[in-house]
Image: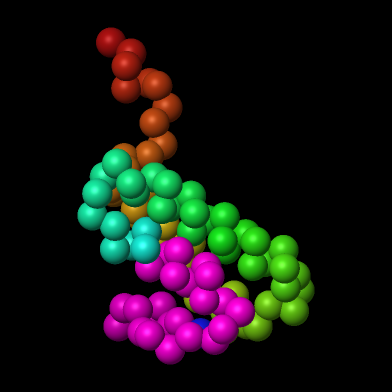
Amino acid sequence: MTSYGEEGLSRKFMEPATTWQKALEEAINETDPAKLPDKVMAAESAMFNRIIEVGSDLPEDELQAMKRGATELRKIQIERLHWPKTGLDQVN
């Protein structure tokens, strides 16, 4: 399984989890602002699908990695995509 510690992303994978981990890495590493929203959504979907697939049998270390990954996705949404866009920034 990929580890998302303070050292950054490592390349050690556990097979079932690779789909969400690869999607997360693609979102983190995307440099094209036009492609970034789709990459973030793909990573979120892959993580959700993994949770649905495994349910309560999700290994604790993978769950912790997902939590850190979700935090990284939220940072991308806020810092790089400037979400949430509430429409209030249009008010004079």
- Give the vertical position of 89 relative to 24 (above or below): above
Residue 44: in magenta span: no
Residue nearest the observer in this picture, 10 or 5? 10
Residue 37 in the image: above or below residue 59: above
Looking at the picture, tell me which residue is in the foreground, 32 or 69. Answer: 32
- The chosen color scheme is rainbow
Give the residue displayed 68% in from the left and 77% down from the top. 58
Residue 32 falls left or right of residue 36: left
Q: Position of residue 62 (x, y in %)?
A: 57, 79
Residue at (37, 59) in percent of width and height = 27
- Against 16, residue 43 (above or below) is above
Q: What x and y, as percent, mark residue 91?
A: 33, 13
Q: Position of residue 3 (x, y in %)?
A: 43, 83
Residue located at (31% from left, 78% from top): 8
Which portion, as a residue range, is magenta?
A: 2-25
Using the image as rendered, state which of residue 28 and residue 91 is in the foreground: 28
Q: Is residue 68 visible?
A: no
Q: Quadrant of residue 22?
A: bottom left
Q: Residue furthest right?
A: 56
In the rendered image, the quadrant that contains the C terminus is: top left
